[in-house]
Amino acid sequence: MSDELKYLSVALLVLFAFVPVTVQALKKRKQPTPPLASNDRKLYRLWRSDPDAYQRQYGALDVEYIKAQKSRSK
């Protein structure tokens, strides 16, 4: 009985440790990458680590890039 309780407690500890990390990783994977970050590794790392900082620094450039791509495709 004691061994079963130990295994159960270890299983619960593992679930408690890895489920939040896995859920967070899946949420980040679903986010669409901004256009400038998809072409530049440095910007991609900045966007992954701090999306707000990326938006403050490069958000306006992303908007201009999207407008230029739309006008170019017309």
Image (cartoon, rainbow, N blue to C red):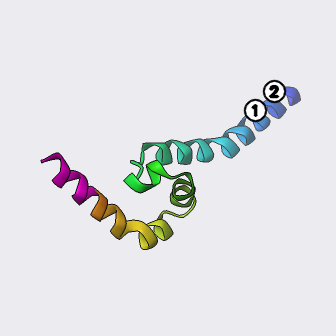
Position in image of residue 65 (x %, y %) = 30, 59
Labelled pair 2, 1 in contact (Cβ < 8 Å): yes
Position in image of residue 14 (x %, y %) = 73, 39
- The amino acid beneath tag 2 is Glu
- Viewer-proximal residue among 1 and 42: 42
* Quarter of the rendering containing residue 5: top right
Q: Which residue is mark 2?
A: 4
Q: Residue furthest left?
A: 74
Position in image of residue 31 (x %, y %) = 42, 48
* Residue 70 magenta: yes
Alpha-carbon neighbours of circle 2 within 10 Å: few (<14), some, or many (≥20)? few
Secondary structure of the residue carrying numbered label 2 = helix
- Viewer-proximal residue among 74 and 34: 74
Name the side, left or right, on which 59 lies relative to 2: left
- The quadrant of the image that shows the N terminus is top right
- Vertical placement of 4 versus 46: above or below? above
Name the side, left or right, on which 10 lies relative to 20: right
> What's the magenta region?
66-74
Query: Residue sitting at 29 percent across and 63 percent down?
Result: 63
- Viewer-proximal residue among 67 and 7: 67
Query: Residue sitting at 45 percent across and 72 percent down?
Result: 57
- Vertical placement of 70 versus 56: above or below? above
Position in image of residue 68 (x %, y %) = 24, 57
Query: Residue sitting at 52 percent across and 54 percent down?
Result: 44
Query: Residue sitting at 77 percent across and 38 percent down?
Result: 9
Q: Which residue is mark 1?
A: 8
